[in-house]
Amino acid sequence: MTNNTSDRYNESEIIRRHDDYLIDHTEIEGKTLTKIQGYGVVEKGLYQKLVVMKHIDKEFIQNDREKFDDIIRDMKKLRHLNVIQFLGICNDTEKKSYLIAIEYANNGTLEDYILKHGNDLSRNKKLTIAKDIAHGLKYMHDIGIIHKRLSTKMIFMNNGKVKISNPAFLELNLDVSSSISLQREIMFLDPEVINHKNSELTSASDIYSLGVIMWTISNGKLPFEGITDQTTLVNRIVFKNMRERPDNNISPAYNDLYQKCWDFDRSKRPDTDVVCKQLEVMLQEFQEEQNPDLILDASEISQQDPENSRQKNNGSELPDENEIGHQEVSYNKKRSGFMNMLKIKCTRKSKKMSTEKFTKTSDRKFPEKKSLFNHLKETFTKKSKKASGKAPEKASETAPEKASEKAVKTT
């Protein structure tokens, strides 16, 4: 065996190392060219199910074999219900290229889904979408992967279920040089990256993006609607620290959470653990409100068993009303371990609602922008640091310019 680097990153050797994901090219049927946001021009075909395939020129592999090997490894790592799955790689001898196959999402992007169904989506569905995105992102961060480009265009819906784009796959089509592409990124991009040239994208950057996505889910429209000038957009989001104002579509707790996520100060943003837990609680509480049959109060319990005010449930006792100092006790029949033991009440008051379109906290000096495009492109392609300092959890195989210029300061 040789340790020679050139042998290690020989094209054939790289493919052999991933032979557990090799696909016979003849097994892919009905291939047609199509264009998908974030993926560029791809082929759609049938391999047991509908798949999306990206052609990778062998010249690309020869020029940067190590990078290609890393991309395949990262794609293989991501095995989660809410992340687009990598299905395999095959050698297309006709076109002298390799095909990377991933699962196809039949409802398009989250952005398309929201703009089409936003006004009709129930509060339960909106909370479920936000929760599933948070869980998919938590999974990535737990295994040390930062998405970097999280947005409504980089999340897909398959049969109404959330599928976050595989960030490693995006590296095969990284093009942020155009003004249209960059503008879409800026609305969801951590402003710290634009404000400081040497700043890198971190897991906290993904949290910022998640906060903007949560607002979008709640409102059924894109942020900063009507602003088409890129300079104005950067000035408002980054240097004036302006954000869309909260709404009453879901709950004050939900508003409070996404405002914490998009805080300009990275150190004040919650991590994915906190976001997931709070969204779980919000969804649980909303479902309880909508399903009163699942709730019993103390008077009903007493009437059912007047001689015994203590009711057994999975080995634990429910205190009577005198012990807890209340006239009524709400109790969930389907009380289950984690949610009811944890039972965090997200009843914080939301920040004062503004009547203006946007809110801001401070002004910042607008620096020279001549290198903005190159800076962002370099930032996206830069090798990420570990997403989390904690030990990664075991991967889950099935786990789930017409806009107003006015602004007010948030309290």
Image: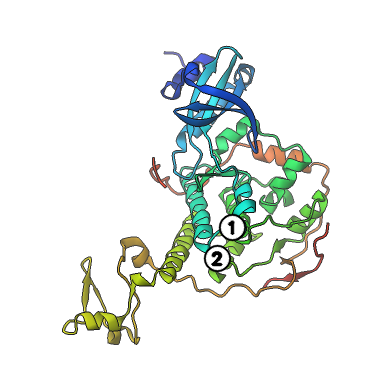
The coloring applied to the image is rainbow
Image coordinates for residue 292, horizontal then vertical, percent = 38, 72
Secondary-structure class at tag 2: helix
Image coordinates for residue 317, horizontal then vertical, percent = 23, 74
Please give the label number shown on residue 214: 1
Asked whether, in this view, residue 2 is left or right of residue 310, the answer is: right
Q: Amino acid at mark 2?
A: Tyr
| In contact (CB < 8 Å): disc 2 and disc 1 | yes
Name the image quarter holding residue 258.
bottom right
**Is 297 located above or below residue 278 in the figure?**
below
Give the crowd class for mark 2: few <14, some 14-19, many >=20 residues within 10 Å: many
Q: Amino acid at mark 1?
A: Met
Secondary-structure class at tag 1: helix
Q: Which residue lies most toward the left here? A: 307
Q: Which residue appears at 78% of the width and 41% of the height?
A: 179
Which of 157/1 is in front? 157
Asked whether, in this view, residue 194 is left or right of residue 119, the answer is: right
Give whichever of discs 2 and 1 has the lower sequence position. 1
Report which residue position mark 2 lands on: 254
Note whether residue 41 is visible.
Answer: no
The quarter in which the C terminus is drawn is: bottom right
